[in-house]
């Protein structure tokens, strides 16, 4: 019976848990997302820690806030640049270093039993070899997830693929034109051939 209770307890504590992967560039700011519906719940307590979110609180807390009070932060490099009152408690690490790589856990204390939202994020650090790309005023590299269908479609529409698609398109048009002209002119040529053959046969009889 006790084992069954622990089983259901483990399921309930994992219902609101999610895992993300974020890629950051050395020397640049990197943001680890964590949000909740503040219109429904109001301003809630939350915490960020190094390591996966445990059953209670956060592991090695680096930033936390109780009921909207001024946040405690382990280092000034840990900032909340989103609108906390709107439920955006995403953690921004300023001037990210190699030592910042690892797993971070965000816990949002939603009232009720087993309602806390938990977000585990794996931060991977990479070299900033190329200039930071900017798309719609958002730095690429702050949040990189699995490629969406739109991204795959854009990747497919590269120069090489466009050339291949154009070649296939023109090839289909040529085949279609040949087929149309063949159907249009073949009966006439066949009829002319039959008339010629008939005339030759008549001459042979005479």
Image (cartoon, rainbow, N blue to C red):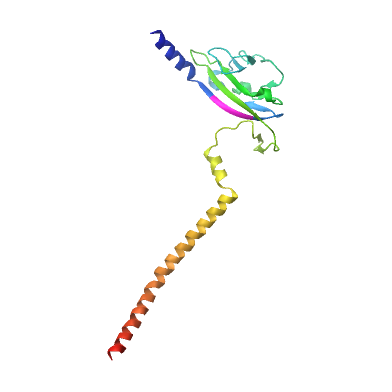
Q: For the point 63% across and 21% down, which residue is it?
A: 84
Looking at the rendered image, the quarter that the N terminus falls into is top left
Farthest-out residue, left:
205
- Residue 174 as seen in the image, left or right of residue 189: right
Residue 91 magenta: no
Which residue appears at 47% of the width and 59% of the height?
172
User: What secondary structure is the magenta-colored segment mainly?
Assistant: strand
Q: Nearer the viewer, residue 98 or 173?
A: 98
Where is 205 relative to 184, above or below? below
Q: Quadrant of the C terminus?
A: bottom left
Q: Judge left or right: residue 123 versus residue 180.
A: right
Give the mark count. 0
Range covered by the magenta-colored residues: 19-23
Give the percent coordinates (x, y) of residue 109: 55, 15
Q: Which residue appears at 36% of the width and 75% of the height? A: 190
Q: Does any portion of residue 35 appear in the rendered image?
A: no
């Amino acid at each position: 019976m006790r084992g069954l209770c622990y089983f259901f307890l483990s399921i309930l504590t994992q219902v609101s848990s999610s895992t993300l992967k974020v890629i950051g560039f050395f020397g640049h700011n990197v943001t680890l997302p964590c949000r909740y519906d503040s219109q429904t719940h109001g301003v809630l307590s939350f915490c960020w820690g190094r390591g996966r979110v445990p059953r209670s609180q956060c592991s090695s807390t680096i930033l936390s806030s109780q009921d909207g009070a001024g946040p405690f932060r382990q280092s000034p490099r840990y900032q909340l640049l989103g609108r906390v009152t709107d439920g955006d408690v995403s953690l921004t690490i300023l001037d990210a270093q190699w030592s910042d790589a690892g797993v971070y856990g965000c816990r949002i204390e939603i009232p009720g039993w087993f309602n806390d939202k938990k977000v585990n994020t794996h931060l991977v650090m990479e070299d900033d070899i190329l200039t930071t790309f900017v798309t719609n005023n958002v730095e690429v590299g702050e949040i990189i997830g699995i490629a969406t269908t739109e991204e795959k479609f854009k990747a497919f529409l590269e120069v090489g693929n466009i050339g291949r698609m154009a070649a296939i398109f023109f090839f289909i048009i040529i085949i279609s034109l040949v087929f149309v002209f063949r159907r249009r002119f073949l009966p006439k040529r066949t009829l002319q051939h039959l008339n010629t053959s008939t005339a030759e046969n008549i001459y042979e009889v005479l």
